[in-house]
Amino acid sequence: MKKSTIWSLFIFTIAGWVVFGETMISPVSTALSDQAPDGAKLYAVHCGVCHAQGGNIINPALPVKGSAKMKSLAVFTAYNRNPLKADGSKGVMPGFPVDKISDQEMKLIYEYSLTLPGTKK
Ligand code: HEC
C-alpha cells in the first residue's frame, strides 16, 4: 500500500468517528436527560418564583433555608404535597400533587435545595 493510501484511510477513520460517533452518542445522552431532569431546573420552574436562593419573598419568616422540612426527603415530600403551617392551617404555598411533581422529581428538588447556601438537613 502506498503511503498516501494509508494516510487517507487514517483520515477517513478519524472523520468517521467524529461523524458517526456523535450520532451514536447523542440518542443515549438525550435519553439520559429525559430520565434525569435537573434539580436546579425543576426548582427554578416550581419553587424559584417564591423561593429564589432558598428565601421566601411572600413570607420571609418561612424560607427553605433553615426549614425543619429539610430534615428528610419524606418530610420534605409530605410538606410539598400538602403544605400546612405549623398550626395546621393552609398557608399561601400551593400543594404539588404527584401529577405536577413526581416522587423522582421531588427527590431531585430536595437534593438541589440542600445545596442552597444556608440550607441544612
Ligand atoms: C406561590 C409561592 C410559592 C411557591 C411556588 C412555593 N412556595 Fe414554598 N412557601 C411559600 C410560602 C408563602 C411559605 C410559607 C408558608 C405558607 O404560607 O404556605 C412557604 C414555605 C416553604 C417551606 C418552609 C416551610 C416551613 O414551615 O419551614 C419550604 C421548605 C418550602 N416552602 C418549599 C417549597 C418548594 C420545594 C417549592 C417547589 C416545589 C415551593 N416551596 C414552592 C410559597 C411558595
Image (cartoon, rainbow, N blue to C red):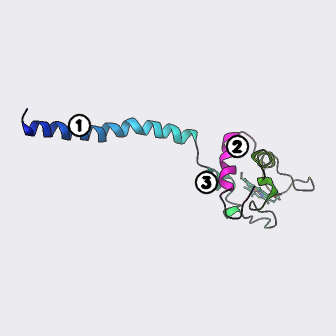
| Residue visible at 20% across and 38% down in the picture | 12
For label 2, being within 8 Å of ligand 1 is answered no
Residue found 25% across the figure and 40% down from its top? 14
Q: Nearer the viewer, mark 1 or mark 2?
A: 1
Kind of residue indicated by mark 2 = Lys
- Closer to the observer: label 3 or label 1? 1
Q: Quadrant of the N terminus?
A: top left
In whole angstroms, how far apart are the C-alphas of marks 1 and 2? 48 Å
The residue where tag 2 is placed is 100
Label drawn at residue 104:
none
Q: Amino acid at mark 3?
A: Ala
Q: Amino acid at mark 1?
A: Thr
Residue labelled with disc 3: 40
Q: Earlier in the sequence, mark 1 or mark 2?
A: 1
Q: Quadrant of the C terminus?
A: bottom right
Please provide percent x and percent y for residue 53.
Answer: 67, 63
Task: List the single residue furthest toward the top.
Answer: 1
Mark on residue 13? 1
Q: Which residues are magenta?
A: 98-117
Residue 69 appears at what percent x and percent y?
A: 80, 53
